[in-house]
Amino acid sequence: MRESKARKIERAAEVVKLLYNEYPNAKCSLHYNNAQELLVATILSAQCTDHRVNIVTKDLFRKYTSAKDYAYCDIKTLSEDIHSCGYHNQKARSIQGSSLMIVEEYHGHVPDTMEALIKLPGVGRKTANCILGEYYGFPSVVIDTHMVRIMNLLDFTKSKDPKKIELELMELFPEKDWVKLTHMVIDHGRAVCIARRPQCNTCTLSDLCPSVIN
């Protein structure tokens, strides 16, 4: 029998409650001190672990302290500085291109709207939502690989398209939980609902998950 939207919203509320109990201290694992650093760290995090990004940015943020530093730096040197994060040439171009636009069009300040953020080179909805929610405090849902996989397992979506998933989840979960939800799901994906070996027998969401492996 197909689950009604009303019931799905009720189940989403139960999931959030359990996640809050399990991961009360869930937060962004990227280290940053300002919006520019968060932007850079988020760009670096694509296809790379947050742990590796934090190792790289420890020295990177000492060397590059403003959008101007990234905008007018030697691109080859920047690429070398972020080499261990993977896709370093592409990421260096994104960091420099977005920083240049921030300097020239936004007086050195990272913009605080989705429309403006996604116009920056290398910035998509995932990075934009991270900045809007994590730094500026606007309700937003970041859709990363953990969110795609776990929300499909929970049958809150049947899509793999991040934008579609984002919009679907915004209809199911209360706005006040959007930012925290992403962090809790990421923690859950790393600790329990692991992609290749989900620990369904110890999962706090097992009674609410249609995909439980018995």
Image (spheres, rainbow, N blue to C red):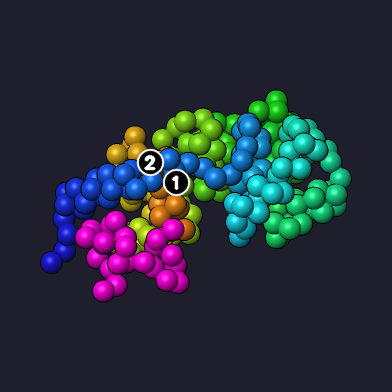
Q: In the rendered view of the protein, which quadrant contains the C terminus?
A: bottom left
Residue 107 spot, x, y in % from top left:
70, 25
Q: Name the image quarter holding residue 105.
A: top right
Q: Is residue 159 visible?
A: no
Q: Residues within 10 Å of mark 1 (few under 14, many from 20)?
A: many
Q: CA distance from mark 2 to mark 1?
A: 10 Å
Q: From which residue to which does the magenta span run?
A: 191-214
Instruction: Judge by depth and name the residue closer to the eye, 46 or 170.
Output: 46
Instruction: Give the position of the N terminus as an image quadrant.
Output: bottom left
Q: Earlier in the sequence, mark 2 or mark 1?
A: 2
Q: Residue at x 76, y 33 (%)?
A: 65
Whether residue 208 is visible to the viewer of this picture, yes or no, is yes
Check if residue 197 falls in the magenta segment. yes
Q: Main secondary structure of the magenta part?
A: loop
x and y, in percent, of residue 202 in the image = 32, 62
Q: Amino acid at mark 1?
A: His
Marks 2 and 1 in Cβ contact (< 8 Å): no
- In the image, 67 versus 209, the foreground residue is 209
Give the residue at the far front of this rendering: 202
Percent across and percent down for residue 203 are 31, 60
Which residue is label 2 attached to?
A: 24
Left or right of 4 in this view: 171 = right
Residue in view at x 41 percent, y 35 percent:
139
Q: Which mark, by number, is residue 183?
A: 1
**Label 2 neighbourhood size at 10 Å, few (<14), some (14-19), many (20+)?**
few
Residue at the spot 58% in from the left edge and 39% down from the top edge: 117
As for residue 10 lying within the magenta part, the answer is: no
SS for dot 1: helix
Q: Is residue 102 above or below residue 127?
A: above
The relative height of residue 2 versus residue 10 in the rendered view (above or below) is below
